[in-house]
Image: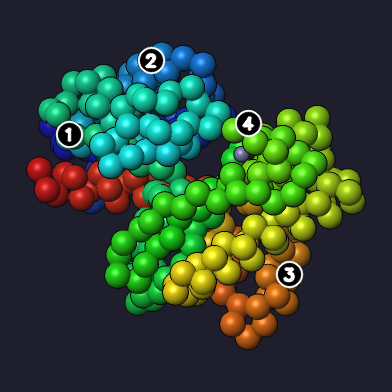
Amino acid sequence: MREVLAITEQGASRTRTAIFGLNGRPLGAFLEHQTDSTNYQASITLIGDTLGKQARKFGGRIVAGSMAIAAEVNTEGVLTRAGALSCVGERPGVDLTHALDLPEGSVSVMNDIFAAAKSQQHINAQNGRFVDGVALTLSSGFNNAYFFADGCIQPRETGHDYYKEGATCACGKEGCYEAHISGKGIKRNRGLPSEEWLQYPLGQGEFIGGVSAAAIAIVERDRAGDLNPEELRWTGGVALGQPFLMQRVAANVRNHFGPTAPVFETATMGEHAGLHGALLDAQAHAMAA
Ligand SMILES: [Zn+2]
């Protein structure tokens, strides 16, 4: 039986699962289902069952796995803040290990933007590009992670920093960046899905202003902390779905920083960035086993 890797990415609205060979080749299609954010145990069971079926279809035996999740994870693999997912205190890596009937420690879990940063860092290194940068995801929520030229990654929490009044956040605070610019924040405060709200000039103006302010604040804070992010790489449904508005944001960031502006990229880190980061993690796991 061939050995395979089980990968999953759980977002606030959808969950994807995929099976890969140890060499990183995908086996079959990526499956997608709606995230049941109200029932943690049911969603782990569904992910485990789906991955098991996918692996069996290709005559594979799962030897390691990794999960990227739209939630904050501590070094013990415990979810510490879960945004739209109702699973604080849970240990999805451990639970998915059991669901897949694997030995202890076979499935790791990480924040989804951490996974996307890992992906970008790996792709940069393959291109001989060793730089510091920031990976940002703008979808249901807003989050970012700092990747270093030397291979380290540091999760960041700026989505819930104060931007300005006029929007309440799911975290309970008023005025967070996330409340103003994320899909869930827009829905909550403007009463429309972001793709609708962003067709109106008012919505577009607020979005461009909010995302520009967030990007500039992130770079300025890093520079004040003696770091120098050379690139900002965006992913996530809202950023990827609004390439023209994001071009306006890029122009604002360039104007603000002038010749020292970081590279601003919305197109390169596609919707599979999180899955790719999880795959790299699972490969490292399988190698170490
Ligand atoms: Zn908030």
Mark 4 in CB contact with mark 1 (< 8 angstroms):
no
Determine crowd level at label 2: few under 14, some 14-19, many 20+ residues with C-alpha closer than 10 A.
Answer: some
- Horizontal side, residue 97 vs residue 144: left or right: left
Residue 90 place in picture, x, y as percent: 35, 24
Distance from mark 3 CB to nearest ligand 1 atom below 8 Å: no
Residue 105, disc: 1
The structure residue drawn at horizontal position 48% and vertical position 37%, both measured from the top left corner, is 70
What amino acid is found at the position of numbered circle 4 in the picture? Gly
Q: Which residue is mark 4?
A: 172
Which numbered disc, 4 or 2, marks the residue closer to the eye? 4
The structure residue drawn at horizontal position 76% and vertical position 65%, both measured from the top left corner, is 248
Q: Which mark sits nearer the N-terminus, 3 or 4? A: 4
Ligand 1 location (quadrant): top right
Residue 252, disc: 3
Quadrant including the N terminus = top left
Residue 40 place in picture, x, y as percent: 42, 18
The structure residue drawn at horizontal position 64% and vertical position 57%, both measured from the top left corner, is 214
Q: Which residue is mark 2?
A: 41
Q: Secondary structure at mark 1?
A: loop
Which numbered disc, 4 or 1, marks the residue closer to the eye? 4
